[in-house]
Image (cartoon, grey):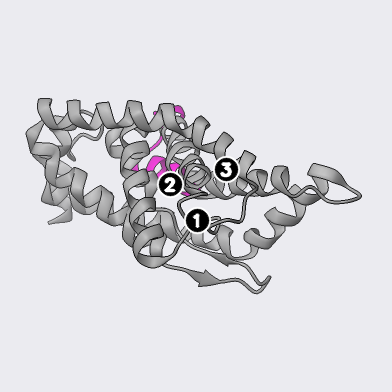
Amino acid sequence: MHIAEGYLPPLHAAAWTAAAAPFVIHGTREVARLVRERPGARLLLGAAGAFTFVLSAIKLPSVTGSSSHPTGAGVGAVLFGPPVMAALGTVVLLFQALLLAHGGLTTLGANVFSMAVAGPWAAYAVYRLLSRASSGIRVFTAVAVADLVTYCVTATQLALAFPDATGGFASAWTRFLGLFAVTQIPLAVVEGIIAVLLIGALRTWAPDELAELGVLQPAPQGEEAARA
């Protein structure tokens, strides 16, 4: 992750592009609606995109010979919802492909589907399911799951394109997951912790913007006074 330029067979690359396209189109409309209805969210929107770009550009080598990186998409999914992250994630991945040679144009659809569609939707689902838990637990779990789901989908994409000669898809999927897991599991934990700290800071720095979004409410006055 990201899947490199020209690595997927053309048919697979086209199929993943077609699968990701509806989410990106819908996400672009959601971004436009968000900016139109809540102009105060523009700064947070830009920050979410920058956060995703920076974290997903950190490329860490794995002892298995592969490489891994955080995704950064989970935080944006918690703040804005997964449709918005489909659009932001596409911009991030396009810039990385063009400027950093991370991923590629032919594999953009596959990378978008794993990091900007599957990951954010997983984060949002977990965040909603844990509605009775504390904010820290919800954010940590959602972001960590988004990270791991991204890599599970990437492993699925690679296994579908390159099934094992004897064990087929299942054997290849297990092998690709093993390549990522050594570094990705601790990275998911670290990204979850960073997300909790970031959301906590946003509660202090931008409580009005969070309240306007209606996704995260600012901390009660008593909690703010206790932290002070």
The magenta stretch spans which residues?
Answer: 129-144
- For the residue pair 10 and 189, the one nearer the viewer reads as 10
Q: Which amino acid does the dot numbered 1 rest on? A: Ala
The residue pinned by badge 2 equals 143
Assess whether mark 1 and mark 2 are in contact (beta carbons under 8 angstroms): yes
- For the residue pair 201 and 117, the one nearer the viewer reads as 117
Quadrant location, the N terminus: bottom right
Q: How crowded is mark 1: few (under 14 residues within 10 Å), some or many (20 or more)?
A: many
Q: Which amino acid does the dot numbered 2 rest on? A: Val
Q: Distance between the residues labelled 2 and 1?
A: 8 Å
- Magenta stretch: includes residue 140: yes
Residue 54: which quarter of the image?
Answer: bottom left
Q: Earlier in the sequence, mark 1 or mark 3?
A: 3
- Residue drawn at x 82%, y 49% as measured from the top left: 171
The residue pinned by badge 1 equals 188
**Residue 92 picture location, percent across and down:** 34, 52
Q: Is residue 51 left or right of residue 107?
A: left
Q: Which amino acid does the dot numbered 3 rest on? A: Ala
